[in-house]
Image (tube, coloured by chain):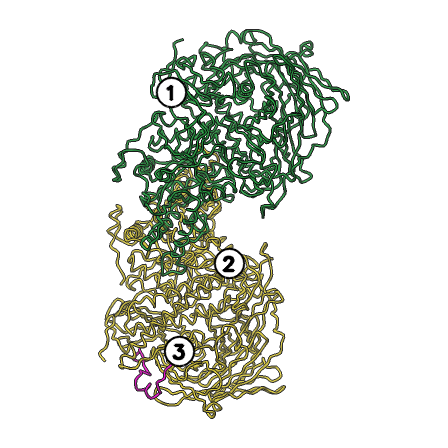
Chain colours: A yellow, B green
Amino acid sequence: MIRKEVFKLFWVIGICCIMTVECSQCPESKSGMLNVHLVSHTHDDVGWLKTVDQYYYGANNTIQRAGVQYILDSVVQALLENPNRKFIYVESAFFYRWWNQQTSEMQQTVKNLVSSGQLEFIGGGWCMNDEAASHYNAIIDQMSLGLMKLNATFGDSARPRIAWQIDPFGHSREQASLFAQMGFDGLFFGRLDYDDKRNRWKNQQMEMIWQASQNLGEASWLFTGALPNGYGPPQGFCFDILCDDAPIMDDPKLHDYNVDQKVSDFLSAAHEEAKGYATSDIIMTMGMDFHYQNAHVWFKNLDKLIRYVNQEQGKGSNVNIFYSTPSCYLDALHAAGKTWPTKQDDFFPYASDHHAFWTGYFTSRPTLKGYIRTTNSFLQAVKQLSAMAGFGYDDRLEELKEAMAVAQHHDAVSGTAQQHVTNDYSLRLSEGVDKGFDQMNDAFREIANGSSASPKLDFFFCPLLNVSSCPQTENSDSFVVSLYNPLARPRNKFVRLPVPPNYGYKVIDHQGNSVTAQLVPLPESLENIPGRSGSTSLFDLVFLAVDIPPLGTVQYHISRTTNSRIIRQQLSKLKVPKNGEDFIISHERVTLTLDGSSPNMMKIQTQGETDIKKRVINQEFVYYEGMVGNNSKEEFRASGAYIFRPDGNDPKPLGNKLKIKSLSGPVLTEIQQVWSPWVSQVVRIYDGTPKLEMEWLVGPIPISDTIGKEVVNRVTLEDMDTHDTFLTDANGRELLARVKDHRSTWHLNNTEPVSGNYYPVNSRLILKSANSDFKFAVMTDRSQGGTSLNSGQAELMIHRRLLHDDAFGVGEPLNETQFGEGLVVRGKHHLLLSDFSTPACDFGCLHRSLGEELMLEPVISIAPTSMDHATWRETQKTLWSGLSAPLPSSIHLLTLEPLNVNMLLLRLEHMYEQGESEKHSDPVKLDLKNLLSWWEIVKMHETTLSGNQWKEDESRLKWKVEKTNDNHIRRETNYAHNSDRDFVITLNPMEIKTFIITVEKKSV
Amino acid sequence: MIRKEVFKLFWVIGICCIMTVECSQCPESKSGMLNVHLVSHTHDDVGWLKTVDQYYYGANNTIQRAGVQYILDSVVQALLENPNRKFIYVESAFFYRWWNQQTSEMQQTVKNLVSSGQLEFIGGGWCMNDEAASHYNAIIDQMSLGLMKLNATFGDSARPRIAWQIDPFGHSREQASLFAQMGFDGLFFGRLDYDDKRNRWKNQQMEMIWQASQNLGEASWLFTGALPNGYGPPQGFCFDILCDDAPIMDDPKLHDYNVDQKVSDFLSAAHEEAKGYATSDIIMTMGMDFHYQNAHVWFKNLDKLIRYVNQEQGKGSNVNIFYSTPSCYLDALHAAGKTWPTKQDDFFPYASDHHAFWTGYFTSRPTLKGYIRTTNSFLQAVKQLSAMAGFGYDDRLEELKEAMAVAQHHDAVSGTAQQHVTNDYSLRLSEGVDKGFDQMNDAFREIANGSSASPKLDFFFCPLLNVSSCPQTENSDSFVVSLYNPLARPRNKFVRLPVPPNYGYKVIDHQGNSVTAQLVPLPESLENIPGRSGSTSLFDLVFLAVDIPPLGTVQYHISRTTNSRIIRQQLSKLKVPKNGEDFIISHERVTLTLDGSSPNMMKIQTQGETDIKKRVINQEFVYYEGMVGNNSKEEFRASGAYIFRPDGNDPKPLGNKLKIKSLSGPVLTEIQQVWSPWVSQVVRIYDGTPKLEMEWLVGPIPISDTIGKEVVNRVTLEDMDTHDTFLTDANGRELLARVKDHRSTWHLNNTEPVSGNYYPVNSRLILKSANSDFKFAVMTDRSQGGTSLNSGQAELMIHRRLLHDDAFGVGEPLNETQFGEGLVVRGKHHLLLSDFSTPACDFGCLHRSLGEELMLEPVISIAPTSMDHATWRETQKTLWSGLSAPLPSSIHLLTLEPLNVNMLLLRLEHMYEQGESEKHSDPVKLDLKNLLSWWEIVKMHETTLSGNQWKEDESRLKWKVEKTNDNHIRRETNYAHNSDRDFVITLNPMEIKTFIITVEKKSV
């Protein structure tokens, strides 16, 4: 799988090299000189103002003059013209679009350029993913997709050593940690807080060692450099066809000869940059967005620049410039032998000036963010099923993987692409899901075939279940529901299926038992949203699916009945409170009381082991008014797709009085609330899984007052002192402590009191009482911006509709509409109180377990059938698990993915941080030999996180650091990852181990 | 000199070819199909919105994204990638900027591409010259400069066969005639009157044989094609990086696959175009302004287009497309064997819609037009002197030639470039003149050395003589004036030298005689114009230089005196008329009376052989108000640099009353008139050369009323019936008859009654009485727009100042300023009446002779000296001629130019049309052996007009035509142009013969 490159091509071009790329392919810095590494590069957004394919082909050029096909075409030519020239390429999504269209001769030419070090892959993921709104599962997938393809095409010698996040709007510590685990030697980025940058420049701390995990120690350390000039060239040296700087005009016979001026300007720029950096090597990024469409223009002028600037050395100049790459630059820094400063927090939020805090995009386009999250869950299921069915590589899965990878781009999941591009991202996901479901159906058949089932069921996927729309459940007299659980342990699930009125339903489980079901009327506010057009459903049929097997399916047989007794039993009882009357829902240990006089005040009473805990919760849906501005000055910045800038620090109430009703029945009780004509909510608590579920429906946000609005859900625990501190997750994994109006590495003068305290929340926001051990978490179903501006208060932004562009490039106001109306968003928050914890599951366990369940929801498929349930049970495999046994409760099965028929990619993850849970944070040892029910693992070889390098070959650069925070970390590392036959592994807290496993079908 | 290309390279690429380029290097048309010739080309303006060097390098890209260096770089690469690809290149000014910077390897690569027919030179002049405002002498020079360089570099096989005038705004018959004489096989252009085009399209007469001379017969015939789509590609097929059309997206895996749509669109476009053209071959110009900066983009998509369109042939499509060139296309048309329609008039004026007549540029930037005209005269003098001094090639002359050639570009002399570019054209001319004068001084020394003169004089050139400013005459106590006469016959010249007040001057001729001189005070309106800042002159010292020798110099010695008697004698007598008193100037045969009551009425009385002729002339300076408009619709077109669109058909009077005075003295009498604060005039008649000279000074045109103004000089001969007909010259040579509100080849609906009747006047506008043989001519000193809107009336536009852009690209209003004020123009009109003719010189002779004198004025150089006139006469060569004898009066020496030390380029021209003059229109036979005084012509070989092909090798394509107007032409052609030893030639009317002559220095 992972090729070791044979370096024979080096001999062809006369360079003797037997080591890794950097040993001889880098230009040598001159000692005593200021060595300037010119890095020719292009930044190719995988969709933004144009779709990824429009960017690839160079279509739709009225929007932006950008065509990646020409970049790669012309770069290859330009590199061939001069062996000193170097170029880096980053985005594999584009590279493979191009590569697949090339002749084998051209492919060989490119291989030669890669071998010689002229063309170097940097980054190498499918895209340059967003770091705020992207989930770690999707980050790992998209990076691995690109890196493993590069490995398959070019071998290990082309393995990117540098992570390259030059454009994302803020940088996540988890992202750095993942990069370190992928074997990267360093990370460079372009954007950091303007004040942070000023400080670092002054102190020559632009480059540092990021200690990127509080659990993983040195394995998470990553050399990190903030680039001097964003990711562009110094002023006056932009030589692209898209630039306006004067070229180097060196024919003295012509007018405007400018060599002397250009050389002088360049020397000034180099000396100026050297002030901010700690060594005598500096980097200049010679490129920009979609540059090098005619690479020749850049290179011709850089050739001249290098010649004329270095000529000055003869006259005493101490500046030495040359073509280089980030890896060559990093090696030069490493060779300096310096001790570097360290960094333990992250680079959020990113502010580019006093009033431009890039925190709006944490929430922008919440439906896209939600769709991406659910598609990730679906993708994992398809991968698992394909792997377990023994399918090997399949174009359909590939399309879904690529769609998900594209969606991680820093203008995709971020919500900062234009509307038509956003539509294209959604279309890709939808097409990918269709293909993936097709493949999933094949897997279902494979599983069913194991039981020689006949007749076959045809399953359908209902993508609009989120708005309670599904033709198969609405229109079939009887149907089979299949639930696939992508978790490595059994789980329960309250299944909700949209159904029309006037029916009752018989629900039969795989053992032939009748299952209690309830008909819950849809909230009125949902009924009429345009996305549901054509749906006949007025009810959700709800029942609890119990013990869905790990990596397995369970089926239910459901049939309609007009039996009025059943209907009556199943119909929920409606209750509308009288004035001032309290509402009470009680489930097992938890009792929820909605205050009759002030129904947004909730009281939660929890029966603990020894005592009863009571909490008063105030929930509000409120909105900020988006700042209006023409962006001509910092003060005139508008709130937009990137920027959250409220007009005033106090959000506005919705105004209308809360309307409320309860619906109760044999399965559950839920409270339906109407907060305003455009905000409603359903509140639920469940038996067995104590959590407070808040399913909100927001939109269309009204704009007839010409005011953009940014809606937040604010949950305040009364009498809870949190000392301005709260926790947010990074990409759904480790938690970071946030302190209001504070940054760890410089003194913050917060010029945006609300926005400047916003942080990305991928999965959870946690508040801890300063005076007691009480904590609570708000768990999200997608990425959002969040903060805590007041003690005990968690604030999460759930929807935004804005009427002005914020002038950072997207060129459109974030005014999403659908069917001519403002977009409606339906989503969930889950509130977890530490009161809910039990001896078996403490608060850490509560939020990690729920986090895992929210991350990978069961996949529901529907097969209409005329089969009765007896026949169904006889002929169908109604219960199946791909695992021989559930994994230990701390261990998450992160990836099970086919590479080929009997070779799989497996990732296992310890999903707890150190000390997070008394019972679950310990190292876990497990034997994988018999992990799968159908397959025996016969060989197992550990790789880096991204699957593109054997773990034993990993040899990342070591750096001297000023201080370390890793002393407290204890880790067990007893697994011999280079032995193919050792199947017993240990996972330490937050550790992910990645394997390429060879499997053999077990005899039945 | 002229290389015969050896076709060995053809063998290398496997093509057997022993004939000319077209025989095997053209793709073969398929019979029965519509054959579409795709011509990949770039249109590279030699200055327009940016200077020529900014365009070359790609500097100043904020104005326009254009860099020619990258075009040539990338085209070469693209041609190498696919041998089917072809490209044409046009502008040698750019090509040689590039060529001179290439390595010899690259030069060889280019030679191979040229040899193989992949890269073809088309046009090939230094620029694509303007056809309206350019003088034929300068056209021939600029074409020859490019074509002879190409010949020297690539040999005869690369000789351009196609004249390519795709962008000029109207097309001159003389230009076509010159092209024919240069050996071109065909001419293509892009712009013609919209109604003319509609007609021709309808009648399939877009292509024709232009019978381009009424004197030269078939030698002037030229196949001429109007291109289908300007010079751009059909809609939807613009694939340049500068274009917005969708590329061909042929990967079915990606979104937006569009091959089927593109093919279908292309087939429609091809069939649509075929309707306008007469054969089954059609041409598509695949390029635009500065396209192919990344040639790969165009070619990659054209490769695909060709592949996919021709694939359709398998499904029954009858469209066949391929890479081609204009010469291949022309050969295909020729092979059709069709009989073609003919054309005898020209394509002026060009209208692009009902209200966009491109007649403003005939006058735009009158000072630039004037400067170019005088620089042409200067250039001819430098060439002649360098040739006669035996200098051979010299960089200085080259710089002047190139500056003049660049100035012929269709946005240069046309006055349609941006102001900063216009400044650069002037700077180039000025630098060229400086270099040229430096070389001229060397020639003067060479001539003086012949007489072993010592001490040497240092001559200076006074470029500001046109505003009576010259430091050397103003500040020197004594100085020598040298007059060089570039005509091949002796001439007289009234010399005017700026001098300060309070001095008289002794003027001594080469024989030691004292010469009568007069001090004429400068017109007051001239004194204070900003351009004269620093000048101390208040007078012109005027004397008559008699018999300046042909291609020779005469010197005068001038010294200051404060002798009050002399001062008194020389000072002009001022006379201001009393109210109602007539003004009378009388010189020999002509008496001019300015009416006392109405001084813009002049009476001219001429003493003929037998009778006295009296004419009444009404002269007016009036102005049109430029139309204001936003150009959003045809009706809203503004008058601008290109477009003349008056607001109303009747020009406005100046308003103020004419002020008048006369100044008389021993040399001449002149009338100084002040018409308004910004228009004044000096009227002169001279002894010996009967003509009425009107020297006007116009500007700054006031704009405080926010109205742009276009000033005309209108001369009306009372009681003269001209039946709406008048004559204008074409590029200073043949005359064309114009009829008001009429076009020869289609029915004109004149939607702009004034502008639609404007024509370019390069040198003269002539009116003939319909009832008598009276005629008159207004001779100009530069190109102007002119017309005759009323009987007996000649109208010439002399200055324009406009406040709105006309939206044809230049993007600036034509609002010329200098030193913060509106530009002032000083120029001359000469009025010639047929009354002035004599038996020796009829009217034809009058205007041809004066035309020649205005075309090549003597060059005045000043050498301050302390030498007294006796020493001067003893030590200096005060009289010298380069000719052994004057040429016959009909023959103009058009070119004498060094190629190398003993090889010269010689052009002789019969400067009369057939029947134009009784005595001067006959064929002239002359022996050139002893033409030059210092050199004997030992070998003489005739070439085509452009000097890049031996005359005997000329074999232009023959065409069948529908009708001919050449029956009346009789020509003597007894010169054996392929004999090197035959020195006797015959020149027929309007014939130009071009020779490369080998000379040997005569023994003294």
The lab-note entry on whether marks 2 and 3 share a chain reads: yes
Does B547 appear above or below A434?
above
Residue type, label 2: Val
Q: Secondary structure at mark 3?
A: strand
Query: Residue A536, position in %: x, y?
Result: 48, 79
Which image quadrant is residue B942 in? Answer: top left
**Label 2 neighbourhood size at 10 Å, few (<14), some (14-19), many (20+)?**
some
In the image, A834: left or right of B517? left
Judged by depth in the image, the label closer to the viewer, 2 or 3, is 3
Protein chain holding label 3: A
Question: What residue does disc 1 label?
Answer: B903
The answer to which of marks 2 and 3 sits earlier in the sequence is: 2
Question: What residue does disc 2 label?
Answer: A810
In the image, B518: left or right of A826? right
Residue A865 counted in the magenta span? yes
The lab-note entry on whether marks 1 and 2 share a chain reads: no
Query: Residue B14, position in %: x, y?
Result: 25, 40
In the image, A642: left or right of A68? right
Total labels drawn: 3
Residue type, label 3: Ile
Does B953 appear above or below A933?
above
Q: Quadrant of the N terminus of chain B?
A: top left
**Label 3 neighbourhood size at 10 Å, few (<14), some (14-19), many (20+)?**
many
Which image quadrant is residue A263 in? Answer: top left
